[in-house]
Image (cartoon, helix red, strand yellow):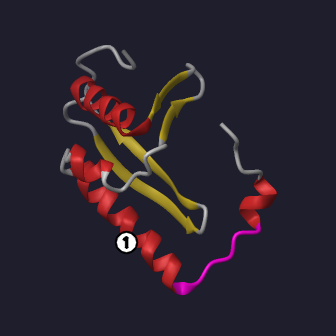
Amino acid sequence: MDQESARDMLDRRTTPELHEEIRELWKKHSIAEDARDISGLLSTLTEDCIYEIVPTGHVWTGHEGAARFNQDLIGAFPDIRFQLDSIVIGPQGVFEEAWVTGRQEKDWPP
């Protein structure tokens, strides 16, 4: 898969309207995540989305992979909670930092 370079990402232009569109999509994603609404969460992702845990090398791709990632995560941590600490919204997407807490009941990642 070709990855966009950091320079290309920095060259992306934005508008107030694009910023608001990305912000609203992130809010929809976050609400679906908190509600354990996998189909709602998937509706906020591109078809070629990637979930990756870099230190372990685990990778989930596409909507099927994203659904499996989230189902397995919720299955392993049924009381998982995300407390947002900071967020950055830009034309490249959204970066968030959060405190994640929960009781682990199953191995994860599987």
Image: 56 above or below 31 = above
Instruction: Return the residue at label 1.
Output: 24
| Picture coordinates of residue 32, whole percent (x, y) | 24, 54
Q: Secondary structure at mark 1?
A: helix
Magenta stretch bounds: 11-16
Which residue is drawn at the image coordinates 18% and 50% (left, top)?
A: 35
**Which part of the image, by quadrant, shows the N terminus?**
top right
**Which part of the image, by quadrant, shows the C terminus?**
top left
Is residue 107 or residue 57 the one in the foreground?
57
The residue sitting at the right extreme is: 7
Which residue is drawn at the image coordinates 45% and 79% (left, top)?
A: 20
Quadrant hosting residue 26: bottom left
| Magenta segment includes 89 | no
Image: 80 above or below 58 = below
Is residue 70 or residue 12 the one in the foreground?
12
Q: Few, some or many C-alpha atoms within 10 Å of disc 1 (few <14, some 14-19, many ≥20)?
A: few
Quadrant hosting residue 30: bottom left
Magenta span main SS: loop
Is residue 31 or residue 38 the one in the foreground?
38
Query: Is residue 54 shown left or right of residue 10?
Result: left
Residue kind at label 1, given as amino acid type: Glu
| Picture coordinates of residue 23, whole percent (x, y) | 43, 71
Number of marks drawn: 1
Which residue is drawn at the image coordinates 35% and 52% (left, top)?
A: 83
| Picture coordinates of residue 88, whole percent (x, y) | 55, 64
The residue sitting at the bottom extreme is: 16
